């Protein structure tokens, strides 16, 4: 089988098609699946207790509910001044998984959440379950992880919005 015009055309179409599919799945830069939290108040207030999760992990209705219940934020009172809470809510909802300008990954997350549901934890979504179904339950209990919500324990660039597999480092303990 020599290289002729037909074989070359098939080869180039395969390479181009594969590149297109990878770009559509992972984003144009190949790494940052979600926009990192760049909104100053959101980054400052959220990361005071935990990683500032990318807004694209949940739909807007989840962020609205969460921000409306900050006095009962996972067993803590995380209340904020109304103007600060309003600005953070605006940032989160404008960058949520179900926004029109969301990525394909964000659309997948949003489509897996029933319209009448507003989950407060990405770890409780079907998409998280799909991505982490091979992780044994004992791994989540390791001291270096401690919780499914501790993304940065395994995802080395989570705070930059990148959750790609090649950047995962699972703690041994």
Image (spheres, rainbow, N blue to C red):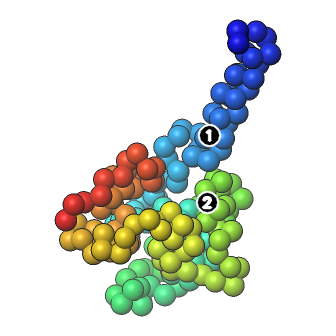
Left or right of 168 in this view: 164: right
Which of these two is toward me, 164 or 106? 164
Disc 1 or disc 2, which is closer to the eye?
1
In primary-sequence order, the first of circles 1 and 2 is 1
Using the image, determine if residue 172 lies above or below residue 76: above
Q: Are marks 1 and 2 in contact (CB under 8 Å)?
A: no
Can you say which quadrant of the picture contains the C terminus?
A: bottom left
Q: Position of residue 81 (x, y in %)?
A: 43, 80
The residue under label 1 is 23
Residue at the limit of the structure toward the right, as seen here: 6
101 relative to 122 in the view: left or right: right
Q: Which residue position holds label 2?
A: 106
Instruction: Classify residue 118 by image quadrant.
Output: bottom right
Question: Could you tell me if residue 96 is visible in this image?
Answer: no
Q: Residue at x 37, y 64 (%)?
A: 151
Disc 2 element: helix
Residue 38 drawn above or below residue 90: above
Residue 144 in view: yes
């Amino acid at each position: 089988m020599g290289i002729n015009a037909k074989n070359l055309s098939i080869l180039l179409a395969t390479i181009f098609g594969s590149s297109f599919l990878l770009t559509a799945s992972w984003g144009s830069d190949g790494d940052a699946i979600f926009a990192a939290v760049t909104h100053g108040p959101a980054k400052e207030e959220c990361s005071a207790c935990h990683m500032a999760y990318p807004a694209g992990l949940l739909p807007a209705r989840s962020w609205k509910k969460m921000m409306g219940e900050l006095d009962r934020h996972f067993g803590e009172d995380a209340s904020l001044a109304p103007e600060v809470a309003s600005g953070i809510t605006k940032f989160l909802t404008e960058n949520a998984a179900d926004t029109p300008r969301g990525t394909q990954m964000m659309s997948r997350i949003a489509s897996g959440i029933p319209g009448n549901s507003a989950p407060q934890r990405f770890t409780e979504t079907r998409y998280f379950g799909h991505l982490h179904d091979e992780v044994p339950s004992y791994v989540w209990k390791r001291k270096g992880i401690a919780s499914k919500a501790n993304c940065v324990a395994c995802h080395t660039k989570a705070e930059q919005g990148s959750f790609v597999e090649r950047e995962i480092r699972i703690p041994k303990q």
